[in-house]
Amino acid sequence: MPPEKSPPQVLFLPLGMPEPGVSLQRWLYEALRSAILAGRLPAGSKLPSTRALAEYYQLARGTAQAAYQQLLSEGYVVAQTGSGTRVCQVLPDATLDAGYVRRRVEGQVEVPRTPPTTPWIERLDAIDPVFARRQVMPGLRPFFPHRGDTQAFPVDLWRKLHIQQLRASRLSILLDSDPGGLPALRAAIAGYLAIARGVQVPAERILVLNSVQQGLDLCLRLLAPGDSRVWMEDPGYPGARQLIDVSGVQRVDVPVDAFGIQVEEGVRLAPDARLAYVTPSRQAPLGGELSPARRLALLQWAAQHGSYIFEDDYDSEYRFIAKPIPALRSMPAAEQSVILAGTFSKLLFPTIRLAYLVLPEHLLESFTRAAALMSRHANSLAQAVLADFIHEGHFDRHVRRMRKIYASRAEAFAESARRHWQGLIEVPEIRAGLDISCNLQVESEQDAFARLQAAGIDVLPLARYCVKPRPPGLVLGFAPYDERAIEDAAKAVAVALR
C-alpha cells in the first residue's frame, strides 16, 4: 500500500476581521478554534509558528502565543519539539457539529435556506439523471456503450508532442488564445473534414469548443427562442434530449426507423420548428444511416422554413462495411442551414474535451462571441498538441488502426452472440460504431437489466433512449474489450438471462 499522506502545513488561513469590542487574543483564539471544528484545519495539520502568524496578521507575538496556549490547554492542538504545533487527532468537541462555529451577530435572525427554485432548475430536476451518472461510472466492464479503447491510444507520442509545445520558445501557448480556436487546429480540422467527411469549408468557419453538448447549447440559446419547437430523434441520444428539455424550448419527438429520422413525420408534427437535432451518418442508438431521399427532404424543409439542422457526426469515422458516408453538410444545399458538430473525445480519449462546429458564415460572429462569453476558449495547449497530431499524420494513422481493431472486435462480438445468445438477444449486422442496439427476446428490459447488473455486466436499456415505447432492447458496446473479454462476458450474459 502507498504510504499515507500527512496533512500539509497551513501557510495561509483567512480568519476574517475582528469584531468591535473583542480583544485580538480572543478573536484569534475563536477564529482558530472555529476553523478546527469546521474542518478547515484538519486533524494533524501543522499550524504556522507564532512568529509567522503574528507577522502575517500584524499582531504582537505574545497575542499569538496566548491564543495558541489556550488552544493547547483545551485540547485542540498539541505541541511537540521538532514537530511544531498540530491539530489534535481527537478533538474535545467531537460531538459538536460544524453548526456550532457559524458566525453569530447579536440580534441577527438567520433566514432558513431552501434549494432555489427557478424555471431552469425545475427543468433540470425533471430530467432523468441516471444516464449522465452512468457515463462517469468508474471501471470498464463489458458491455457498456459509447466508449472507445483508450488503452490503444499512443500515449508516449502524445506526451512527446506536449513536451515540444512546452519548450521555452513556445510558452506563449499558455496565454489566452483566439476564442474561435487556434488557427493551426482549425486548419487541421478543415483539412481532415475535406478528406474524411467530404466537407469543403474554410478554416475560419470552424469554431473549436469543449464538447458537442456545448455546441448544441449554443444553438438552442442563439437560434431557438423560448417558445420555439425543436425536432429530436426518437429514439435518440439522451444527452441531447436532456439539454433540449433544460433549455425550455418545446421538444418534438420525431420517430426514427432503419432509414433515419422520418422527415415527413417531423414536418407533420412541427413544420415551423427552428432546429432539428439529427445523427444522419450513424443514428444514435439504432445505427442506421439517413437515406438519400430523406437527406434531400430534410434540407428542403430547412430551406423553406428558415430552420437549422444540427448534424451530430456521431461515430461516423468507424465504419466497417464500406467507406464512411459523407456528412450531410457536404451536400451543396446544406451550406446555409446545416451546423456540423464533431468531437475528438470518441476518436482519441474522453478527457481531451475538444470538439468543433462548422458554421454557416452568417452565424460565425454571433457564435464566436457567445462562446467567448461563456467559456473564453478551449484549452490552448491541448489544441496545439492536437493540431500537431493531425498535421504530422498521427491522427489518420490512429483512426485507421482503431477502425481495424474495432471491426475485429465487432466480428468477435457477433460471433460470441451467435454461440451463446440464441433465443435471448438478437444482434443485427454491425456496420459501424462503438456499440450496437440489440433486440431483447426474453423478459422485460428492466428485468434483464437488473439480472445483468447483478452478474457484473454493464449495458443500457433501449428504453433509456426512447420517449415512445418500442420493442424491448439493449444497447451494448464492444469497442474497448478484447476478444477474450467479449467471449467471457457473452457467457456471463447467457447465464444471467437464462
Image (cartoon, grey):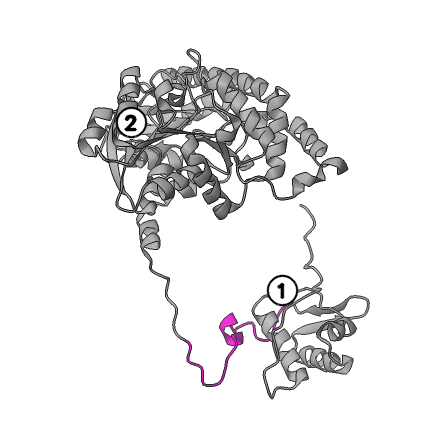
In the image, is residue 91 part of the stretch drawn in magenta?
yes
Mark carried by residue 383: none
Indicate the quadrant where residue 214 lies.
top left
Where's residue 118, x and y in %?
33, 58
Is the stretch drawn in magenta largely helix, strand or loop? loop
Which residue position holds label 2? 303
Asked if residue 377 is positioned above or below residue 117 in the image, the reply reads above
**Spatial CA span between label 2 and label 1:** 63 Å
Q: Foreground: 428 or 124?
A: 124
Asked if residue 469 is positioned above or below residue 115 in the image, the reply reads above
Image quarter (top left, top right, bottom left or bottom right) of the N terminus = top right
Where's residue 174, x and y in %?
66, 42
Q: Foreground: 306 or 326?
A: 306
Q: Is residue 212 left or right of residue 395?
A: left
Under mark 1, the amino acid is Pro
- For mark 1, give the secondary structure: loop
What is the crowding at mark 1: few (fewer than 14 residues within 10 Å), some, or many (at least 20)? some
Q: Could you tell me if residue 43 is visible in this image?
A: yes
What is the crowding at mark 2: few (fewer than 14 residues within 10 Å), some, or many (at least 20)? some
Circle 2/circle 1 CB separation < 8 Å: no
Where's residue 98, x and y in %?
52, 71
Which residue position holds label 1? 42
- For mark 2, give the secondary structure: helix
Indicate the quadrant where residue 212 lies.
top left
Q: Farthest residue to the top: give it.
A: 322
Q: Farthest residue to the left: give it.
A: 268
Where's residue 426, x and y in %?
31, 20
Instruction: Read off the magenta span.
Output: 89-110
Q: Foreground: 405 or 6?
A: 405
Quick one: label 2 or label 1, which is nearer the N terminus?
A: 1
Q: Could you tell me if residue 259 is visible in this image?
A: no
